């Protein structure tokens, strides 16, 4: 037994080279097409979410604390800017998780404009 399938004809080596070249060209086109997209897989999303939350809260607290010291208003601006920073952090996390704002003008494949007749969640246009 040679382990070959008698029903399957052997292909010459040049055919293999041509198939490899076609696959490499297709991969290069795919990489060029997603050059503006960020790769948000697993740990990338977790890292971005953590940085977004901590960063926006830190900026909000720093602005509030600085304005309170400068204006002598007590903790009031610190509290206001803490909540503004928290709201900005939650909004950024929502955007990161739902893949909004990855690049300017970015729209995922299959994502249609909801006002232009595309179906929303529960409709027939479920491609996410």
Image: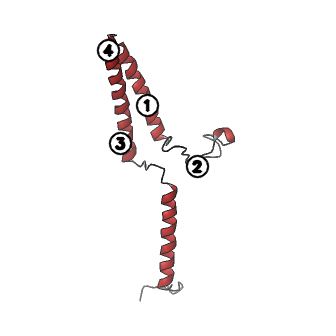
Point out the frontmost of discs 2 and 4.
4
Point out the frontmost of discs 3 and 4.
4
Which residue is located at x 48 percent, y 59 percent?
31
Q: CA distance from mark 2 to mark 3?
A: 26 Å
Q: Earlier in the sequence, mark 3 or mark 1?
A: 3
Q: What x and y, as percent, mark residue 55?
A: 35, 32
Q: What x and y, as percent, mark residue 112?
A: 62, 45
Point out the frontmost of discs 2 and 3.
3
- The residue where tag 3 is placed is 47
Relative depth, front residue between 64 and 2: 64
Q: Is residue 19 left or right of 73 when viewed as pictured?
A: right
* Callout 2 touching callout 4 (CB < 8 Å): no
Which residue is located at x 51 percent, y 75 percent?
19
Which residue appears farthest toward the bottom when viewing the image? 1
Q: Earlier in the sequence, mark 2 or mark 3?
A: 3
- The residue where tag 2 is placed is 127
Q: Earlier in the sequence, mark 3 or mark 4?
A: 3
Which residue appears farthest toward the left when viewing the image? 69
């Amino acid at each position: 037994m040679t382990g070959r399938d008698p029903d399957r004809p052997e292909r010459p080596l040049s055919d293999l080279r041509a198939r490899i070249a076609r696959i490499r060209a297709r991969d290069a086109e795919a990489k060029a097409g997603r050059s503006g997209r960020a790769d948000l897989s697993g740990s990338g999303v977790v890292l971005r979410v953590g940085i977004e939350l901590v960063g926006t809260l830190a900026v909000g607290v720093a602005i509030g604390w600085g304005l309170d010291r400068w204006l002598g208003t007590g903790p009031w601006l610190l509290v206001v800017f803490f909540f503004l920073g928290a709201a900005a952090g939650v909004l950024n996390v929502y955007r990161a998780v739902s893949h909004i704002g990855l690049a300017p003008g970015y729209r995922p494949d299959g994502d249609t404009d909801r006002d232009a007749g595309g179906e929303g969640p529960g409709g027939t246009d479920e491609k996410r």
